[in-house]
Image (cartoon, coloured by chain):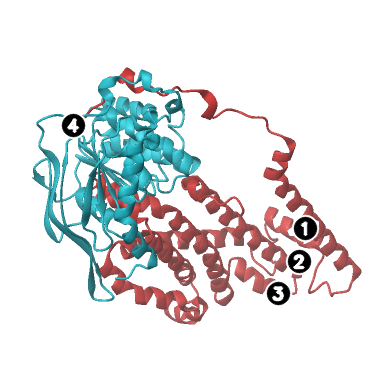
Chain colours: A red, B cyan
């Protein structure tokens, strides 16, 4: 074995601080480039809602179709803070429906992850599993999920089971396909390096392929959330008596447009928050893939 | 960088040129090595290297030069155990190569650092995968020492994406040296690094192996890099790669300090090797015909 002979002799490199990391000043200009977009967004949205409000007041459009922004927000506030009075047309407040939908979404996404992540990893890692499963994955992934709703209503009736099945089917394929792609695109040189330094087959999977695939899996979950939310709304619109989707149809039926707009607004907020959580998660687990532009 | 400050006067005379320890058998022996790849779609197989017989002595720095696509990388992959030979034998320390082993480490052209691991964790990797009989304290000490050797103290907790190309490759070199393997394989390690940093890295590598006495097989398509580093330059012909000539380089070491590029011998060697690879390079440039 060849060795370094003396440890003193090694430190021939003078550790000058020329290339060391040091603290610097944080200027206003830099603060603006970092946080300026936030300020712009706040102002932008404020203007948007103000114009909407003025437009609604002008009476150019029937308030049945376009209620004032303020009445949407007050419907939202009321729905989120109070329970519906007994005998109301819609049982339960927005809060209860939101909770119901979010619970189903989480259960559906959970099941989709439990099925999708191992399935995708196996498909990427094993050629036979890939060959056998890929036609089914592609067929089901390309089929519009809404076309399956009548079938599942037939099978399972107007039940929570049916709704969760729709959510799982909506969310599982992006998760499978992303995990699969992550394994398949693992950089060859990383695998070669791990092999040269003595990694076993098991270590290759757990210490190279899996960490490399993790951001792909998170991206899959991110897409799965979007699809899953569509699944939630579709399932509830078609066959349900609870949830945000149900609330949309019910409020339309009862000409309660502020409530309908409030639910739509809530869906946007829920969707954006969930997607931002996964984006943050992705940046946290895979900082080397962080995209600062988005 | 310190290289600039090291003058020939403070280089101990016994360091230059590094003599191979006397009476040692060759470390790497390849006999009639033929390797290639299968092209499944075209139902063909491509011979990358044909009939390579080469033995490398302990502590020797051998550089393989040749045009792109001449199979240089295949040679190193075969020695590292990543690729199985079609014909012929590879022996390392008298034992047939059947796969990767802790006696060989490799430096990659694209660094091949795990992006989710810090500098320190990347350098620690060989200890994690190879079950070497090294205690925890000894590992910590060695990792620290090699980070210091490649001048990355202060960057232990940095991630590869936060480093420049040159720094990344120094991590790659430290990772290859840290388990103190007999043999260092380097596959165009400086090809992706800018010209100035490359020269500095070359002299640093020369300094590292002068300390660690590793046997090195180094691939490049730069004739200057070959002469700057090598004890022997092996010129490989265009596909399928065969040994065209082996050129001994007897220039004083450390070569950066002696400014060997100014020596007439250097110019002669350079011209000689260029004549050898010229036709090959033209053939390679015209198109990679199979």
- Most foreground residue, A94 or A20: A20
Residue neighbourhood size for the residue with mark 3, other residues' Cα within 10 Å, grouped as few (<14), some (14–19), many (≥20):
some
Disc 2 + disc 1, Cβ < 8 Å: yes
Which chain does the numbered disc 3 sit on?
Answer: A
Q: CA distance from mark 2 to mark 1?
A: 8 Å
Which residue, given by chain and number where applicable, does mark 1 sit on?
A74
Same chain under badges 4 and 1? The reply is no
Q: CA distance from mark 3 to mark 1?
A: 17 Å
| Mark 4: secondary structure | loop
Which residue, given by chain and number where applicable, does mark 3 sit on?
A252
Which chain does the numbered disc 4 sit on?
Answer: B
Relative to B181, does residue B289 appear above or below in the rendering? below
Which residue, given by chain and number where applicable, does mark 4 sit on?
B20
Relative to B48, does residue A197 appear above or below in the rendering? above
Left/right placement of residue A61 relative to residue B268 reads: right
**Numbered mark located on residue A219 in the image:** none
| Mark 3: secondary structure | helix
Quadrant position of residue B193: top left
- Most foreground residue, B47 or A164: B47
Q: Earlier in the sequence, mark 3 or mark 1?
A: 1
Which residue, given by chain and number where applicable, does mark 2 sit on?
A258
Disc 4 + disc 3, Cβ < 8 Å: no
Q: CA distance from mark 4 to mark 1?
A: 86 Å
Q: Earlier in the sequence, mark 2 or mark 1?
A: 1
Relative to A269, does residue B105 appear above or below in the rendering? above
Relative to B32, does residue A157 appear above or below in the rendering? below
């Amino acid at each position: 074995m060849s060795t370094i002979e003396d440890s003193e002799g090694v430190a021939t490199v003078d550790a000058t601080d020329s290339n060391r990391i040091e603290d610097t000043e944080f200027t206003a200009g830099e603060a603006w480039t970092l946080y300026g977009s936030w300020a712009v967004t706040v102002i932008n949205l404020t203007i948007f809602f103000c114009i909407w409000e003025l437009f609604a007041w002008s009476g150019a459009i029937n308030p049945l179709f376009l209620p004032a922004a303020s009445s949407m927000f007050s419907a939202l506030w009321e729905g989120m803070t109070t329970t519906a009075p007994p005998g109301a047309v819609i049982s339960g407040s927005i809060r209860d429906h939101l909770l119901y939908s979010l619970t189903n979404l989480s259960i559906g996404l959970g099941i989709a992850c439990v099925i999708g992540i191992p399935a995708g990893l196996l498909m990427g890692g094993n050629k036979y599993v890939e060959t056998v499963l890929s036609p089914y994955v592609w067929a089901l992934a390309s089929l519009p999920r809404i076309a399956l709703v009548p079938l599942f209503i037939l099978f399972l009736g107007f039940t929570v089971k049916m709704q969760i099945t729709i959510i799982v089917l909506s969310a599982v394929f992006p998760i499978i396909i992303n995990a699969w792609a992550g394994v398949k695109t693992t950089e060859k040189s990383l695998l070669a390096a791990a092999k040269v330094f003595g990694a076993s087959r098991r270590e290759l999977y757990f210490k190279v392929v899996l960490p490399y695939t993790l951001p792909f899996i998170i991206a899959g979950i991110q897409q799965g959330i979007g699809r899953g939310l569509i699944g939630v709304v579709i399932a509830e619109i078609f066959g349900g008596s609870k949830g945000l989707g149900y609330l949309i149809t019910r409020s339309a039926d009862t000409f309660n447009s502020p409530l309908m707009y409030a639910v739509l607004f809530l869906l946007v907020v829920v969707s954006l928050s969930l997607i931002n959580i996964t984006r943050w998660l992705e940046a946290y687990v895979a900082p080397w893939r962080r995209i600062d532009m988005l | 960088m310190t290289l600039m400050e090291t003058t020939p006067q403070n280089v101990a005379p016994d360091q230059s040129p590094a003599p191979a320890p006397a009476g040692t058998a060759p470390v790497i022996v390849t006999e009639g090595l033929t390797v290639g790849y299968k092209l499944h779609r075209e139902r063909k197989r491509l011979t990358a290297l044909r009939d390579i017989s080469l033995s490398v002595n302990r502590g020797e720095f051998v550089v393989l030069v040749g045009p792109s696509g001449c199979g240089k990388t295949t040679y190193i992959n075969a020695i590292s155990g990543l690729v199985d030979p079609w014909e012929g034998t590879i022996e390392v320390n008298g034992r047939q190569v059947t796969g990767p082993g802790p006696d060989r480490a490799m430096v990659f052209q694209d660094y091949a650092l795990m992006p989710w691991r810090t500098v320190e964790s990347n350098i620690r990797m060989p200890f994690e995968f190879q079950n070497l009989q090294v205690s925890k304290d000894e590992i910590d000490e060695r990792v620290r020492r090699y980070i210091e050797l490649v001048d990355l103290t202060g960057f232990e907790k940095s991630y590869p994406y936060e480093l420049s190309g040159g720094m990344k490759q120094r991590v790659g070199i430290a990772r290859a040296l840290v388990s103190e393997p007999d043999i260092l394989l380097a596959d165009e390690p400086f090809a992706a690094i800018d010209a100035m940093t490359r020269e500095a890295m070359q002299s640093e590598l020369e300094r590292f192996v002068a300390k660690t006495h590793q046997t090195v097989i180094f691939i490049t398509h730069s004739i200057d890099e070959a002469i700057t580093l090598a004890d022997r330059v092996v010129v490989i012909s265009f596909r399928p790669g065969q040994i065209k000539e082996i050129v001994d380089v007897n220039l004083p070491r450390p070569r950066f300090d002696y400014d060997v590029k100014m020596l007439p011998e250097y110019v002669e060697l350079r011209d000689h090797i260029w004549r050898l690879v010229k036709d090959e390079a033209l053939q390679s440039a015209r198109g990679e015909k199979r």
